[in-house]
Image (cartoon, rainbow, N blue to C red):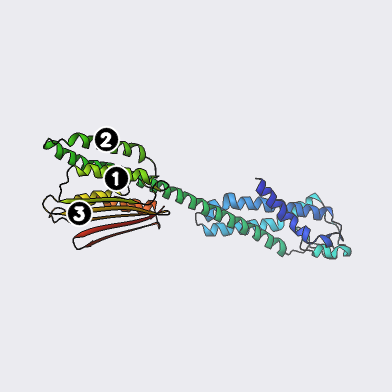
Amino acid sequence: MIAHIAAWVCFFTLPYLVFFPRLREFNMSNHQLASIICNNVFLVLFYYLNTLLLIPKFLVKEKWFLYILSIIVCLLIFLYVPKQIATLIAEPEPFNPQNREFIRNPAFQGKPRMSVSGRKRPVADPYNTVLFLLIFTVGTCFSVIQRWLKTEQTRKETENEKLNTELSFLKSQVNPHFFFNTLNNIYSLAIVRSEKTAPAVMKLSSIMRYILTETQRDKVPLSNEVDFINNFIDLQKVRLTDKVTLNFTIEGSTDNLLVAPLLFIPFVENAFKYGVSTKEPSSINIDIRTEGNIILFSAVNYIVASENNLMENTGIGINNVKRRLELMYPGKHKLTTTEKDHYYTVNLEIVT
């Protein structure tokens, strides 16, 4: 409200400030003052009529003919009605040659065009016409811009809400997928009554605690994620034989960096799923390295020949993490996967 009042005050006083040196030479009559006031009042009324009624009813709904017709009607009203009202308030004075310059001065609105005999000329004031069209144009531009900004804000809020919903759904997919594979491992130990079953259950309990407490946040310390991966690897070791070579290395500082939770575990799972054999030598190498604010993750595993375990069929875990990377690190990650000489390699670079 205050901004509108300030804008109108500036708009109506600017012409008088521009022509102030010339204004001192003239004496404003009561009729001229009444004309200026009436014109200004009608300009304000037409501005809000346009922005509050005509634009929502006609322009927004693409009723172009009705909108243009409304502008023409308003223009005709503005050119003649304020003059008549000003005449009723104060009768125009006879033509005074001393005020010739004042009458021609475009800084003043609503002045009646007088002939020497004192009769009005039936000609529309071009200055008032331009002023009216300017007010309508400014009002239309402001309204269109405001509606565009509001639409953009709504679109962004809707898009953010959609992304948050999708991220929540993707995160909820991680837990069941992870537990499904882990419980299968523990079930295998229980079937053979292995003494490793109880420690495996404790490891699983620790992992579940991490998932329930840490993964509710969008970002977690990288050191916590490393501990989680380490627990997962320890849980996987219970089923490994001496034919599997396993290396998990950490380089650089992991204390001051944040990362999305459960982001690396699908690749680690994938390495154990396709890189472990009980019949032939196999190897898994997992490396996490930090360089400033960059996290470098790599997982390399030997591809164990199996008709049922093809690298092209990686399940929902890998597809899930790819989508999460697109949503959480747009333009700030690089993921590459290669298959060469019976080894499958995943390289992931994240800029935190």
The residue under label 1 is which amino acid type? Answer: Ile
Q: Position of residue 261 (x, y in %)?
A: 35, 45
Disc 2 and disc 3: Cα gap in Å? 27 Å
Say whether residue 162 is left or right of residue 153: left
Query: Can residue 108 be seen?
Result: no
Q: Nearer the N terminus, badge 3 or badge 1?
A: 1
Residue 179 is situated, as x and y percent measured from the top left of the image, at 24, 41
Residue bearing the label numbered 2: 205
| Marked residue nearer the N-terminal end (2 or 3) | 2
Question: For the residue marked with disc 2, what is the amino acid?
Answer: Ser
Q: How crowded is mark 1: few (under 14 residues within 10 Å), some or many (20 or more)?
A: some
Q: In this view, does 331 lie to the left or right of 270?
A: right
Residue situated in front as seen by the camera: 255 or 150:
255
Residue 252 spot, x, y in % from top left: 38, 52
Please tell me whether residue 203 is drawn above or below residue 254 in the rendered image: above
Expressed as whole percent of the image width and height from the top left, the position of residue 152 reads 48, 53
Residue marked by disc 1: 229
- Residue located beneath label 3 in the image: 283
Secondary element type, mark 2: helix
Q: Residue at x 15, y 38 (%)?
A: 189
Tell me which amino acid carries mark 3.
Answer: Ser
Count of picture labels: 3
31 lies left or right of 221 = right
User: Which callout, 2 or 1, points at the residue further toward the start of the chain?
Assistant: 2
Identify the residue shown where x is 11% and y is 37%. 192
Label 1's element?
helix
The residue under the point 86% across, 59% down is 24
Q: Is residue 93 visible?
A: yes
Crowding at dot 3, Cα within 10 Å, few <14 / some 14-19 / many 20+, comes out as many
Residue 336, image quadrant = bottom left
Q: Quadrant of residue 22?
A: bottom right
